[in-house]
């Protein structure tokens, strides 16, 4: 998640840094998303999340 976070680090003339957008996700919504995605619909991560 830190890639691209310090875009202007080496440039002395640029003091403005790119800020990462923080998005809060409800766990129930994320599980629904994982169920719909082909790559994660049968994953161990989804199975463990449904057990909670």
Image: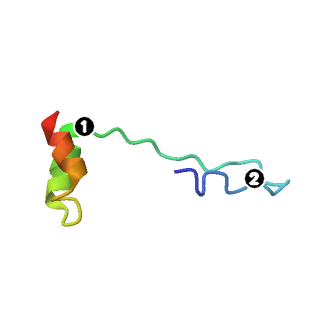
Q: Which quadrant of the structure image shows residue 37?
A: bottom left
Residue at position x 18%, y 66% in the image: 38
Q: Which quadrant of the structure image shows residue 41?
A: bottom left
Please indicate whether residue 28 sits to the left or right of residue 10 in the image: left
* Residue 18 position (above or below residue 40): above
Quarter that holds the C terminus: top left
How many other residues sit within 10 Å of disc 1, few (<14), some (14-19) or many (≥20)?
few
State the residue lying farthest toward the right.
Answer: 12
CB contact under 8 Å: marks 1 and 2: no
How many other residues sit within 10 Å of disc 2, few (<14), some (14-19) or many (≥20)?
few
Residue 15 image label: none
Q: Which residue is mark 2?
A: 9
Q: Position of residue 17 (x, y in %)?
A: 67, 48
Colour setup of the view: rainbow
Element type where label 2 sits in the image: loop
Q: Position of residue 15 (x, y in %)?
A: 76, 48
Please indicate whether residue 28 sits to the left or right of residue 16 in the image: left
* Residue 32 position (above or below residue 25): below
Residue at position x 44%, y 41% in the image: 22
Residue at position x 51%, y 51% in the image: 1
Q: Which residue is mark 1?
A: 26
What's the CA distance linking mark 1 and mark 2?
33 Å
Element type where label 1 sits in the image: loop
Q: Position of residue 6 (x, y in %)?
A: 67, 52
Give 13 or 34, whichever is nearer the viewer.
Answer: 34
Which comes sooner in the sequence, label 1 or label 2? 2
Please indicate whether residue 3 sits to the left or right of residue 47 in the image: right
Give 9 or 16, whichever is nearer the viewer.
Answer: 9
């Amino acid at each position: 998640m830190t890639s691209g976070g310090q875009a202007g680090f080496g440039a002395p003339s640029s003091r403005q840094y790119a800020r990462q957008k923080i998005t809060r996700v409800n766990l129930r919504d994320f599980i629904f998303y994982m169920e719909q995605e082909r790559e994660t619909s049968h994953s161990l991560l989804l199975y463990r999340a449904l057990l909670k």
